[in-house]
Image: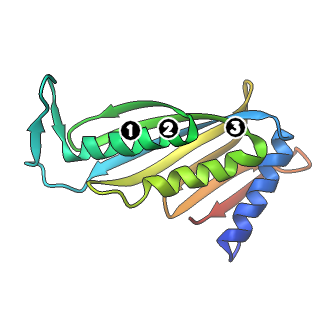
């Protein structure tokens, strides 16, 4: 289902997620892939650290730290000199989880020293997967159960 207005799609998505979760607590698992925008030779050694830290790794760590503090999320990072992956975990209510996801991605876009290349994740209620999503910062595709429970629906969103 493709919609013209991204605002309408986010509203529809929020309503659908709320319907699926029945406003119960859910867990958002957000996997992010980053790449450096800096030249390879911009490397410095942090005092007391045994590995090389680049502007890229510092930038990603800083933005993830801000998100963890703001949203009270958990995180796991695997960063190399020029590439990295971050997983964020957030527990939230069904009504808020969509807005939290959108706000997190907006915070991650446009930082210095890195580009957010790919996003994928899921929304879980207990052991059940309630929604899957994947894409880029400019377009996310959500796969959710339809209201009748027999089909899947696809929502395409823009930030």
Rate crowding at label 2 as few (under 14), some (14 to 19) or many (20 or more) other CA atoms within 10 Å.
Answer: few
Q: Nearer the viewer, residue 146 or 93?
A: 93
Which SS class for mark 1? strand
> Would you say the residues marked 3 and 1 are in contact, meaning their CB atoms lie under 8 Å apart?
no
Expressed as whole percent of the image width and height from the top left, the position of residue 151 reads 83, 49
Q: CA distance from mark 2 to mark 3?
A: 15 Å
- Determine whether, in the image, residue 48 is placed left or right of residue 79: left
Q: Residue at x 50, y 58 (%)?
A: 106
Which SS class for mark 3? strand
- Determine whether, in the image, residue 90 is placed left or right of residue 82: right
- Residue under pointer 3: 92
**Earlier-in-chain disc, 2 versus 3:** 2
Which SS class for mark 2? helix
> Would you say the residues marked 2 and 3 are in contact, meaning their CB atoms lie under 8 Å apart?
no
Expressed as whole percent of the image width and height from the top left, the position of residue 67 reads 48, 43
Expressed as whole percent of the image width and height from the top left, the position of residue 50 reads 14, 22
In the rendered image, the quadrant that contains the N terminus is bottom right
Residue 103 against residue 83 in the figure, above or below = below
- Name the residue furthest left: 41
**Earlier-in-chain disc, 3 versus 1:** 1
Of the two numbered discs 3 and 1 in the rendering, the one whose residue sits closer to the viewer = 3
Of the two numbered discs 2 and 3 in the rendering, the one whose residue sits closer to the viewer = 2
Expressed as whole percent of the image width and height from the top left, the position of residue 29 reads 58, 36
- Residue 48, can we see it? yes
Rate crowding at label 3 as few (under 14), some (14 to 19) or many (20 or more) other CA atoms within 10 Å.
Answer: some
- Residue under pointer 2: 69
- Determine whether, in the image, residue 78 is placed left or right of residue 28: left
- Residue under pointer 1: 85
């Amino acid at each position: 289902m493709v919609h013209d207005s991204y605002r309408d799609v986010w509203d529809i998505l929020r309503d659908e997620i709320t319907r699926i979760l029945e406003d119960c607590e859910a867990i958002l698992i957000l996997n992010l892939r980053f790449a450096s925008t800096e030249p390879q030779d911009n490397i410095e050694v942090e005092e007391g650290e045994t590995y090389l830290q680049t502007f890229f790794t510092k930038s990603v760590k800083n933005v993830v730290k801000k998100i963890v503090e703001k949203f009270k999320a958990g995180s796991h990072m695997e960063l190399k000199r020029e590439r990295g992956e971050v997983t964020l975990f957030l527990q939230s209510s069904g009504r808020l989880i969509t807005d939290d996801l959108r706000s997190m991605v907006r915070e991650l876009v446009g930082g210095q020293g890195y580009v957010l290349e790919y996003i994928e994740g899921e929304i879980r209620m207990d052991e059940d997967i309630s929604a899957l999503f994947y894409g880029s910062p400019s377009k996310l595709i959500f796969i959710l159960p339809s209201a009748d429970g027999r089909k899947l629906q696809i929502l395409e969103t823009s930030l």
